[in-house]
């Protein structure tokens, strides 16, 4: 794995004028306002009620709902530039916190030292990976769309919240702390059941909670934050790439060196002076060129074959970036039709492996002996990795 300069990263990915993405074009928000896509399926809600089927039982459904509870913290996030209407502010300072006088503000003359402390604190609060990037305003949503559109559980009722407002981040915010959270390897493998989706939901919950912890910490040392909670404020993947946490795969997901695409990403934007990390190259682009497993396995055929390009599929893709643009419309419609989220493109990806010596060795080869990529892909297929496991695995096999 080697570090690359921002110029090299820019040359690889940026191929035109980037028009800042409007958050309301995010596929999760479009059913709330876009008549163009509303005809694709009748009911855009996700995850139906419990069923008498392994992986979808009452306890599986309860596990999924309960795993989302941390994400609900997002609803109380008054740090967002466009918080949900009616948002109740959490008490800013609890009994264990304190408001520091201006003269006690942490000395910022040694950004390297502060950066190390921030990274340590982020891990303490729950992040599995942490990186720093300069805030690249091209990834900041041009408009925010409140906290989004919610659906009543299983009943398809739309609750539109918020309005579209122009979003500008003040100049004083120059850095972002980007964090990744591993989703459980064993549990996510019995996709796509309510129990496997609990692994995704726990990723979201952990990131919401960690973001709140870290934001509070930074405020308590005297600096400002924009707590982006889940996927708010800006596009996470390019920020994670700029912060040196991974590279982009054909499946449209951040591929990290240790967990592959099996991560969720959060970020906190701040005025605290920090030292940015460098983007990394560990052979992902070349490997994805040789491997099209996710495109072959995608149940809605939403992933591209062939080369990266700037050609977008619809308004849910950003313009000006050379990558494999996914068709979020057909992907999300599939989720709603099947009444469950889909984790196929995470599970089948050869980078999604446990961190054993064997898989570490193969990963070393995909980085240092890239000529062998077609061979490694064939080996992965022969070994039968990525196949869905027994749907009741969580209750019968998973060990805490
Ligand atoms: S989530 Fe599922 S449907 Fe969507 S792109 Fe991935 S594999 Fe395809
Ligand atoms: S499955 Fe293959 S092509 Fe798809 S993201 Fe993973 S490595 Fe790349």
Image (cartoon, rainbow, N blue to C red):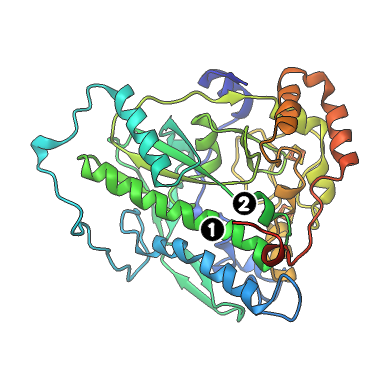
Looking at the image, which is closer to me, 311 or 324? Answer: 324
One can see residue 8 in this view: yes
Provide the residue designation for mark 1.
Answer: 202
Determine which residue is flagged by label 2: 184
Tag 2, which secondary structure? loop
Mark count: 2
| Residue 27 in view of the camera | no
Q: Position of residue 173 (x, y in %)?
A: 31, 37
Disc on the earlier residue, 2 or 1? 2
Q: Measuring 40% from the left and 34% from the top, which residue is drawn there?
A: 135
Which is more toward the observer, 49 or 24? 49
Q: Are marks 2 and 1 in contact (CB under 8 Å)?
A: yes
Residue at 31% x, 58% y: name it. 78
Q: Position of residue 212 (x, y in %)?
A: 35, 52
Question: Circle 1: is it few (<14), some (14-19), or many (20+) Cα within 10 Å?
Answer: many
Residue drawn at point x = 82 percent, y = 35 percent: 291
Residue sitting at 46 percent across and 25 percent down?
A: 277
Residue 32's disc number: none
């Amino acid at each position: 794995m080697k570090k690359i300069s921002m110029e090299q990263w820019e040359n690889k990915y940026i191929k035109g004028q980037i028009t800042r993405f409007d958050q309301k074009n995010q596929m999760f928000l479009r059913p709330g306002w876009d008549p163009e896509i509303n005809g694709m399926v009748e009911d855009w809600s996700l995850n139906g009620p419990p069923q008498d089927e392994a992986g979808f039982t009452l306890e599986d459904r309860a596990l999924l709902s309960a795993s989302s509870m941390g994400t609900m913290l997002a609803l109380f996030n008054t740090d967002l530039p466009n918080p949900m209407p009616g948002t109740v502010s959490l008490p800013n300072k609890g009994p264990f916190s304190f408001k520091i006088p201006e003269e006690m503000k942490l000395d910022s003359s040694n950004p390297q030292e502060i950066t190390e402390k921030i990274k340590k604190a982020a891990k303490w609060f729950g992040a599995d990976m942490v990186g720093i990037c300069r805030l690249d305003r091209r990834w900041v949503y041009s408009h925010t769309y409140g906290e989004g559109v919610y659906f009543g559980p299983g009943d398809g009722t739309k609750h539109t919240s918020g309005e579209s407002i122009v979003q500008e981040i003040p100049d004083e915010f120059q850095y972002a702390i980007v964090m990744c959270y591993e989703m459980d390897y064993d549990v996510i493998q019995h996709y796509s059941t309510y129990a496997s989706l609990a692994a995704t939901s726990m990723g979201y919950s952990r990131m919401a909670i960690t973001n709140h912890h870290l934001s509070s910490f930074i405020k308590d040392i005297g600096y400002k934050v924009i707590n982006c909670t889940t996927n708010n404020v800006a596009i996470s993947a390019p920020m994670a790439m700029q912060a040196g946490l991974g590279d982009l795969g054909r499946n449209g997901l951040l591929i990290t060196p240790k967990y592959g695409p099996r991560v969720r990403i959060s970020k906190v934007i701040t005025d605290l002076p920090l030292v940015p990390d460098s983007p990394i190259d560990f052979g992902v682009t070349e490997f994805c060129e040789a491997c099209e497993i996710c495109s072959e396995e995608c149940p809605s055929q939403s992933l591209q074959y062939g080369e990266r390009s700037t050609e977008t599929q619809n308004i849910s893709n950003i313009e000006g970036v050379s990558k494999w643009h996914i068709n979020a419309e057909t992907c999300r419609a599939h989720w709603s039709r099947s009444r469950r989220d889909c984790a196929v493109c995470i599970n089948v990806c050869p980078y999604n492996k446990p961190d054993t010596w064997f898989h570490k060795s193969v990963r070393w080869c995909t980085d240092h002996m890239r000529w062998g990529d077609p061979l490694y892909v064939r080996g992965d297929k022969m070994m039968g990795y990525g196949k869905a496991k027994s749907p009741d695995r969580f209750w019968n096999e998973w060990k805490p």
